[in-house]
Image: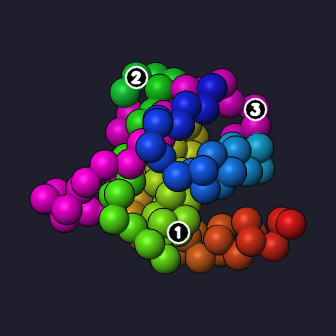
Amino acid sequence: MLYIEEGTRHTAWSVSRWFLREYLSNCDINLTIEERDLSEEGVDGWCIRENEDGFLIQLHSGLEYDYIPTLLHELTHVKQWIEGREQDEYEAYCQEMELLDRYMNKR
């Protein structure tokens, strides 16, 4: 189940639905996405595993052009966890632009 917190951009809904259909369609997970001010934490976003099938992605509310790549980065971490792999920042950074290209060309 995908939950988008009130005040989160509609883009989060469309990108996340696409990613879940393309890469995690056989998985039954609960994913919540929210925007908040993360400037004090010094990050653009992060992914938290709340329980075995529950995940929370928080995105910095001040993101502009890097909003979708950051969301795709965090969604990659969800996929890593579901596949039982270590959280690999390098892989997530490498996937950002490739996934962005796939998402933008899906239409």
Magenta span: 24-49
> Above or below — where is 50 with respect to 12?
above
Looking at the image, which is closer to me, 105 or 52?
105
Name the residue tied to disc 1.
69
Can you give x and y, in whole percent of width and height, for residue 56 in the image?
A: 41, 36
Name the residue tied to disc 3.
26
Q: Give the residue displayed 33% in from the left and 58% down from the top.
A: 60
| Mark 1 vs 3, N-terminal side | 3
Q: CA distance from mark 1 to mark 3?
A: 23 Å
**Position of residue 4 in the picture relative to residue 60 (left or right):** right
Q: Amino acid at mark 2?
A: Asn
Helix or strand or loop: what does disc 1 sit on? helix
In the current view of this chain or complex, which residue is farthest to the front? Answer: 7
In the current view of this chain or complex, which residue is farthest to the right? Answer: 107
Q: CA distance from mark 3 to mark 2?
A: 18 Å
Q: Give the residue displayed 47% in from the left and 35% down from the top.
A: 5
Quadrant of residue 100 within the rendered picture: bottom right
Q: Is residue 90 magenta-colored? A: no
Name the residue tied to disc 2.
51
| Mark 3 vs 2, N-terminal side | 3
Helix or strand or loop: what does disc 3 sit on? loop
Q: Amino acid at mark 3?
A: Asn
Looking at the image, which is closer to me, 4 or 42?
4
| Mark 2 vs 1, N-terminal side | 2
Quadrant of residue 38 within the rendered picture: bottom left
Looking at the image, which is closer to me, 86 or 49?
49
Labelled disc at residue 21:
none
Can you give x and y, in whole percent of width and height, for residue 27 in the image?
A: 68, 30
Q: Residues within 10 Å of mark 3 (few under 14, many from 20)?
A: few
Q: Is residue 43 magenta-colored? A: yes
